[in-house]
Image: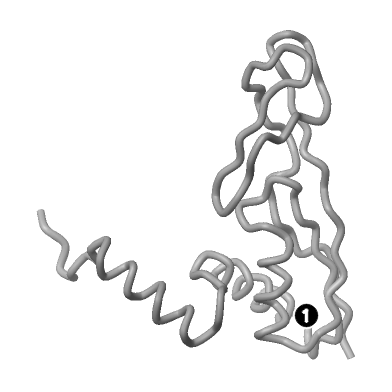
Amino acid sequence: MAPDFPLTSHAEAGLIDEFIELLFGSISMHETIIVKDIIENAKKQGDVESIRIEIGEIAPVPKHDLLECLKRFVDWKVDYYIKEAQVTCDCGFIGHPKILEQGHDFYLIECPECGEVPKVTDGTKIILKDVVVK
């Protein structure tokens, strides 16, 4: 059964991204959605003065893009810390992976011991940890 609403084509999605960039600069829809969620959850605590967030080392949005987007929407003090990526590998390695490349919604990692692709166990999330209200 076909949906009752039109789906956005790749061309239309590109135009939407261009429109958002014109309005907000170099931020994308993805960071905007994540930031909107952080803001909504923080505001549930009251009149926000500052927040502290955990940013996974290989989170879907790079740290600088996330922080820039937050600054465009709120004037709160924003503290953050980076949660280091952790992996386990079939070779027995447990620890920090070798990060070959990373960007929006992707990362390329390998085991520093054997060069295979390990299983990520930590360092992929963006989490609102603390909220200070006025």
Picture quarter with the C terminus: bottom right
* Amino acid carrying mark 1 in the image: Gln
Q: Using the image as rendered, state which of residue 59 and residue 39 is in the foreground.
A: 59
User: How dense is the environment of label 1, judged by Cα within 10 Å: few (below 14), some, or many (20 and up)?
Assistant: few
Name the residue located 72 percent from the left edge and 21 percent from the top edge: 111
Name the residue located 61 percent from the left edge and 71 percent from the top edge: 37
Up/down of 93 relative to 102, above or below: above
Q: Secondary structure at mark 1?
A: loop
Name the outermost residue toward the left.
Answer: 1
Up/down of 90 relative to 117, above or below: above
Name the residue located 74 percent from the left edge and 50 percent from the top edge: 56
The total number of labels drawn is 1
User: Residue 10: x and y, percent?
Assistant: 27, 61
User: Residue 73: x and y, percent?
Assistant: 66, 85
User: Residue 26: x and y, percent?
Assistant: 56, 74
Picture quarter with the N terminus: bottom left
- The residue labelled by disc 1 is 45
Q: Quadrant of residue 90?
A: top right
Q: Using the image as rendered, state which of residue 133 and residue 124 is in the foreground.
A: 124
In this image, 24 relative to 8: left or right? right
User: Residue 2: x and y, percent?
Assistant: 11, 58
In this image, 55 relative to 9: left or right? right
Name the residue located 77 percent from the left edge and 89 percent from the top edge: 75
